[in-house]
Image (spheres, helix red, strand yellow):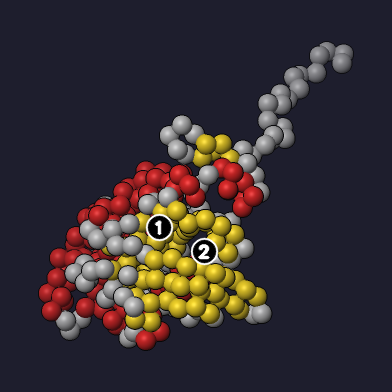
Amino acid sequence: MIAAESIGFSAGGRVLLADITLTLVPGAVLAVIGPNGAGKSTLLRLLAGELRPSRGNITLDSVPLSAMAPLALARRRAVVAQSAALAFPMRVQEVVGLGRLPWHGSRAAVRDDAATGAALHRVGIAHLARRQYQTLSGGERQRVQLARAFAQLDGAARPAALLLDEPTASLDVAHAAALLRALRALAAEGIAVLAVMHDLNEAHFVADRVLVLSEGRPVALGPPEEALAPTLLAPVYGLPFQALPDGGLLPEYGAIPGRGFAPPGPTPPGG
């Protein structure tokens, strides 16, 4: 599958990533976490083939990503960015159908309508199919983009990969949970999933492995119970964490000024 070996990336005279080695495993979810500016989105763009590493190699089934034709790559991996804007009006069903563009002219094109419909149902937005994309909320748009990626991977040769950049950022708790379950179901079908995340508890819930980045360098790569250890995360984020009995994490924010302060009552007569 997609493998990165000792990759690094520099831009504007700054080293944004260094010494990253990982492999996306078919059937498993890898969560990438770290503070703002840690290099998470840059790593995703490198693994997607949108950027070339300044050093090291990235391959898909031992073939360098840089040597793959864009169409061939699009038939093996899909990407869901943090946001996606459209320059002209489109209905939700049409946006999801854009995921089928890599398959035009191939035998798999006969599945275009079925794949689009299945993706809409899978993400729970079939009721939005006729809505204009521009009228949707941010969370609804994110679910549409996820459905587009699902449609793109329908019929893809295995192994295939789905790369997501902060997929739950615009979602409420219920829809975030549904999305995470959808990612687990997709992984169960043999897809390799990588998700850049900020919520550590969501990463603990969905991931088989967690990569922790700090200042562009890997701090840990392993199962959630190891990579999300409070003693490891504290120096990365600059605050302590408390481990919960169910394996979750609670950041210790410290004292909150003004919390518990009672406003003065009415001034007594003659006061």
- Left or right for 47, reference 198: left
- 262 or 204, which is in the foreground? 204
- Left or right for 153, reference 46: left
The image shows residue 249 at horizontal and vertical percentages of 51, 40
The image shows residue 68 at horizontal and vertical percentages of 34, 84
Instruction: Quote the CA–CA distance across marks 1 and 2.
Output: 12 Å
Q: Amino acid at mark 1?
A: Leu
Question: Can you see residue 214?
Answer: yes
Residue at position x 30%, y 52% in the image:
184
The image shows residue 63 at horizontal and vertical percentages of 34, 81
- Left or right for 210, reference 119: right
Q: Residues within 10 Å of mark 1 (few under 14, many from 20)?
A: many
- Circle 1 — which element? strand
Q: Which residue is mark 1?
A: 30
Q: Which residue is mark 2?
A: 40
Quarter in which the C terminus is drawn: top right
- Circle 2 — which element? helix
In the depicted structure, whether residue 71 falls above or below residue 245: below
Q: Amino acid at mark 2?
A: Lys
Residue at position x 16%, y 81% in the image:
106
Residue 75 occupies quadrant: bottom left
- Left or right for 270, reference 253: right
The mark that comes first in sequence, 1 or 2, is 1
